[in-house]
Amino acid sequence: MFQVPFSIYKPLSKNDATLLRKKHFEKWENFFFHSFEMEQQPAEITEVREVILQSWNRSKEYEDLNPMIQGSVKNISDEELKIRKENEVFQLIQPVLKQAGQELSNENHVLLYCDRDGTILESSGDSRVARNIGSSVNANNGAQWSERWAGTNAIGTSMILKQPVQIFSSEHFAYNCHEWACSSAPILDPLTKELLGIINLSTTSDSFHSLTMMKTIGLANQIERILFHNYYQAREIMQNIYIENISKWKNQIVILCNSTGEMIRVNDDAHADELTALMRLTVKNNELPMKKEWEEEVTLHNSPYRARYKKIYWYDRFIGFISILEKKSRNSPSPTSHNHYAKYSFQSLFGQSDSFKSSIHLARVAASSDSNVLITGESGTGKELVASAIHKASNRSEHPFIALNCAAIPKDLLPSELFGYVGGAFTGANPKGSIGKFELANKGTLFLDELGDMPLELQVQLLRVIQEQEITRIGDKARIPIDVRVIAATNKNLIEEIQKANFRKDLYYRLNVIQIELPSLRNRAEDIPLLVNNFIQKLSLKKHHGPNDVTAEAMEILRKYAWPGNIRELENVIEYAVNFSTNGIITPEDLPKHLHTKPTLAIETTKANPVNQVEVEWIVSVLKRVQMNVSKATKELNMSRSTIYRKLKNMGYNIKDLK
């Protein structure tokens, strides 16, 4: 159902149009300048539509917009406009736009085509109207007409709703736009339902015709039919090429990508993150339009590969490429051969928020040095991923990356895990002895997670090892020299732990050479759509099918939720939603029930540390979801039983009472 005011389905006389504009203006003026409660006004046929009220409220939230703006307040550069016009969809639909523009040349209408961001790429139709709307409201090529930059308007509101929308006169947010009546319809990808662009027809409000909306929808449907026919045949060709290559290269990694480097199919799920980053860099670093086939040396999972690339064309149009990754054999064993590689790189970390980018900047600085690093942040913020990325980008990347969760190992066994032991060192020990994590990490990086849970007596030994760069196995007297960089992580406030005599000050300063604080997910909510799309893409590759879209309502729920479990919880929620979604679309009904209600605590915790308070809310919500099965909760929370009991106890909870 499209959003059209009921009062203007019928043809309007000039007097009717004038009266209607006047009544709309009164509503607009009351809403923005007199703060009247709209629901208290008398109901009448010109009552403001709900879709307009919602858009007006959204528009008011932008600090740099006000109702007296001319129209669009943002334009892209000529260089950027030229790049956007090279878009595949824009080039494909040129015949439709040209024909429609000719048909409207004497019809008092202007046709605007916008890309998925609401940027006008082309205008045509009545040249007099085009000049008028361009000069009066900045409806020119390169102007951005999303609600963010123009307030309520047919283009921007249609983008948000993904539905046809008609805006008449003073229903527009911007005062100068009140002269116009505009009809817009979205152009959706026939396969994924992703927004590709917007078709808009505009005319002066006194020249409005009731069939304009139908003409707009007809153009959008015509374009979508062209895209469907083109995409279907192109995808079929690409799939056939992929099938031929996986049959030919049975023991190699075969990747099918679209023209932007986004993976469509891959026969190796294990390295999805690295492959995604590699394909994006391939498109970014190579002059793809200049090459049809090429080879290069790449590194995957710290192993050398020969990558073969071949572009795929459809009617002389570049639509994607196939990539074959063949592992190169080593002539001789490497002295540093091992199986402890860092799994994640900086390309695996997604976020555009200022707080996240600031943390990643510090991490990149840390990667260029050899200093010890302390990573702080709540559980689930990605501390191990950042540690892995630092190691992978450092000069130690060819050597082991060893991770140890200090809270997951019983304190009596932790020394042997770290330093190793000789045969017969204690009852139950391996007769042949065992190498500790420090020795395994020699020349590389040792990541100590949940360092704040390490016992005090072991902190003394750890400090000595870091200072002396040598270890002594339990039960032995020989000193073994090591070269290990330590990256530590904790969700505790170590300064408070030092004051409570739970953590050594000298160890804190030895590790805290470079400190990186990772923001919680609720403090970088603008990154949630990016993270959601990344998780969906990974799951789609893994499961070889969708979903590939999230409704605006579901995304709004995800943005507003507090995320006590941070990114780890978000990833679990998306996997849950993928399993329950239908038709490739995640709706609010597909999300776990606890996201729809605000989590509450059973006790008064207003005086508690905010970080600990949020964390315990997360623990309680998980326990309730698994029917108080602590064993299941340990797996989902990635915590030991003792850690769960201790954290609950510290916040005044008793597990028996919860049960």
Image (cartoon, helix red, strand yellow):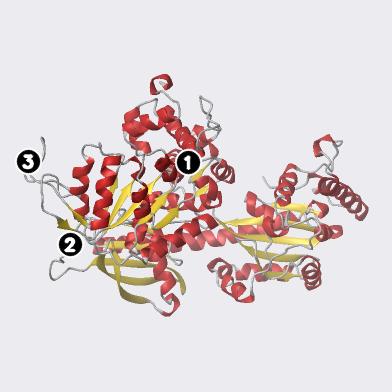
Quick check: 75 left or right of 416?
Answer: right
| Callout 2: SS | loop
Residues at marks 3 and 2 touching, judged by CB atoms closer than 8 Å: no
Where residue 223 appears, x then y in whole percent? 60, 61
Where residue 500 appears, x then y in whole percent? 41, 38
Q: Give the label on residue 370, or none.
A: none
Of the residues shown, which amino acid type is indicated by label 2? Ser
> Badge 3 is on which residue?
424
Q: Among all residues in the image, which is located at the extreme right?
A: 15
> Badge 1 is on which residue?
582
> Vertical placement of 204 versus 166: above or below?
below
Distance from Cα at disc 1 to Cα at disc 3: 58 Å
| Callout 1: SS | loop
> Vertical placement of 151 versus 640: above or below?
below
> Badge 2 is on which residue?
337
Note whether residue 82 is visible: yes
Residues at marks 2 and 1 touching, judged by CB atoms closer than 8 Å: no
